[in-house]
Image (cartoon, grey):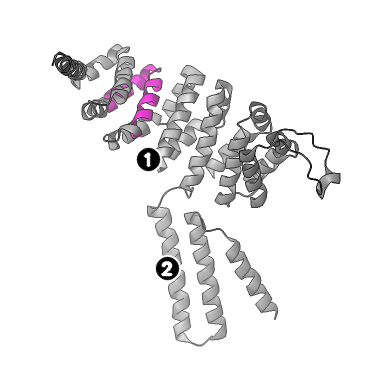
Amino acid sequence: MHEKKESAREWKHLQDISITSSRQTCVFHFALFFHVSRYLFFYSKNNLQTKFIFFFFNVINILEILFYHLFGCSHDWDQELVNSILNLLVSMSNRSPELSLKIEKNGGSELCVNVMDNFCDSREIVINACMLLSNMGNAGKNNVIVKMGQQGVVDVLLSIVASQCGDATFVLEPIHTLSILTGDMNLAKNIASKGMHSICTIAKTHMSNPEILASVHKLIGFLAFQPECLRDIVQHDGPCMVSRVFGTQKKKENKRKQKKTK
Amino acid sequence: MHFFIFFCIFYFYIQVPVSEAPDSVGKEHHPMRHGEDTLQVIHNEGATHIVLEAIKSFEYNPSLIMSSIDALLNITEDETLMETIVRDGGIPIVMEALRR
């Protein structure tokens, strides 16, 4: 009788666990396998078949946990949860620079880097994290920017920019954040040396998108303030790219004029 | 707890000035309502504190944390309420939720 009550309580506890994150799923599976195998083992002690099931279930679960920790994501955060928290933080940081600084003091920049690293394919998360970083960078000026640089923001942002070159809406906000990070000389040099190629590729692939062209040229303009970056800009056909933009604009104007005269 | 947080979100969207229902059961347990802002009443009743406590204590329940964050997002629409959330230590609690 006591055994039955205990099992009912345990089963209720299992039902109460919300299976939303992957670590919880692992724990749930482990608990389920353990209970099933324990009952089978209890009711037929001398049966070899049940002993095999007991062994099989537990080996599968251990493998599941091992695979999750070795090859799965490094955090068991729920994507939607992360997105909603970032939404709240962005709306707070938009209100005042003091709040942005407070978020930064609580480890905001470090978390943004981790989040972008883990969810680099999620457009919403990357855009929100970039907006938060931009707000913090604008609020704290140079000190915060230097701190962000130490946490490896530039590398993460450049890897996102390089991997999502074709998607203009995805790349727009990271480029804006990069242009804020150029406030520090060392970071500007780093961006120019590591990311100039992907920045120019974006400009070349989105020649007809004025929004992305404006933000790319703003970034190149900020980089050009540092004399050390000029070599990288020239090496990657920066001036040629600017003249090409002017060329396409002139062609468009000429076409318009021709249409008007007709 | 879920119900309470959904209630907060729901009432924020309605935004009707609060007045006492004629056959209200809880009439004796709170001060008289005189058409105050719904959001203000929710805050006065200690909703923000409860929501922050929920985020802090139910660390392994992402759905509850998400609902709480949604409620906070609605409450922070009001400038003064946002200040009180920040004063109550809302930012470290939210950051901690992201860190888990």
Q: Residue at x 55, y 76 (%)?
A: A38
Amino acid type at image mark 1 = Cys
* Residue A9 is one of the magenta-drawn residues: no
Vertical comparison of A9 with A256: above or below: below
Q: Residues within 10 Å of mark 1 (few under 14, many from 20)?
A: some
In the rendered image, the residue lying farthest to the right is B28
Question: Considering the image in quadrants, where does the N terminus of chain A appear?
Answer: bottom right
Residue B1 seen from this side: no
Q: Residue at x 58, y 25 (%)?
A: A99
Q: Are marks 2 and 1 on the same chain?
A: yes
Which residue is more in the foreground, A245 or A120?
A245
Between marks 2 and 1, how big is the CA–CA gap? 30 Å
Q: Which mark is residue B49?
A: none
Q: Residues within 10 Å of mark 2 (few under 14, many from 20)?
A: some
Vertical comparison of B33 with A144: above or below: below
Label 1 element class? loop
Which residue is more in the foreground, A184 or A211?
A211
Vertical comparison of B66 with A50: above or below: above
Residue A20 seen from this side: yes
Residue on which disc 1 sits: A120
Vertical comparison of A160 with A2: above or below: above
* Residue A192 is one of the magenta-drawn residues: yes
In primary-sequence order, the first of circles 2 and 1 is 2
Which residue is more in the foreground, A31 or A200?
A200
Q: Residue A37 in the image: state x and y as whole percent.
A: 51, 76
Label 2 element class? helix
Residue on which disc 2 sits: A60
The image quarter in which residue A245 lies: top left
Magenta-drawn segment: A170-195
Left or right: where does residue A207 sit relative to residue B56? Answer: left
Say which chain tag 1 marks.
A
Q: Residue A133 in the image: state x and y as whole percent.
A: 46, 28
